[in-house]
Image (cartoon, rainbow, N blue to C red):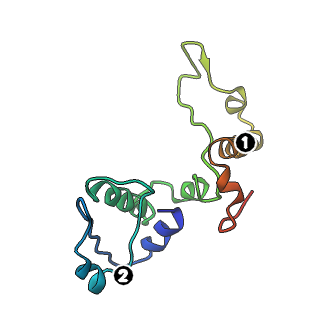
Amino acid sequence: MRQALFQELAGLSQMVILCGSYEGIDQRVCDHLVTREVSLGDFVLTSGEIPTLALINGVVRLLPGTVGKEESLKAESFEMSLLDYPQYTRPADFRGWRVPEVLLSGNHQAIARWRQQQQIRRTSERRPDLLSDGDRDTP
């Protein structure tokens, strides 16, 4: 599953999902009724319900009205081939763990720069493949 798949499926007017158990779905059903197979990753589970929930969640959140501010969907992980920047909540100081000062500065340009730097750093550390994937836009 990739974000591009969720975007494609969010444009459909309807979708029927079959999720197999143990060894999968009867091949005759696959041969005659299945138009697309989707995988969550390179591992085996006992049933398809968990990957199905991931697929549904990834698609539904892209439907109009699901997320409060649709503009926020454009700046999320994988929309620009970058992982998300660190998130912080209140209070600004929790047990001596401080929110980075730049986020408290009110300087929107500096905050945007910091967030982008953090996205690039996190992506290069955790998912460098995203930065070199020819199928995606790179920063």
Count the labels in the image. Answer: 2
Q: Residue at x 46, y 66 (%)?
A: 6
**Which residue is situated farthest in the bottom direction here?**
32
| Front residue (pair 96, 111) | 96
> Residue 80 appears at what percent x and percent y?
65, 58
Badge nearest the viewer, 2 or 1: 2
Position of 8 compared to 139: left or right?
A: left
* Type of amino acid at the residue the image marks with label 1: His
Residues packed near mark 1 inside 10 Å, few (<14), some (14 to 19) or many (20 plus):
few
Residue 97, quarter of picture: top right
Height in image: 71 above or below 4? above
Image quadrant for the C terminus?
Answer: bottom right
Height in image: 131 above or below 33? above
Q: Residue at x 70, y 45 (%)?
A: 124
Dot 1 falls on a residue whose secondary structure is helix
Q: Residue at x 40, y 78 (%)?
A: 12
**Residue for badge 2:** 35
> Residue 85 appears at what percent x and percent y?
63, 42
Label located before the other in sequence (2 or 1): 2
| Front residue (pair 123, 12) | 123
Dot 2 falls on a residue whose secondary structure is loop
> Residue 106 appears at what percent x and percent y?
71, 34
Residues packed near mark 2 inside 10 Å, few (<14), some (14 to 19) or many (20 plus):
few
Residue 55, quarter of picture: bottom left
Position of 24 compared to 3: left or right?
A: left
Position of 127 compared to 54: left or right?
A: right
**Residue for badge 1:** 108
* Type of amino acid at the residue the image marks with label 2: Thr
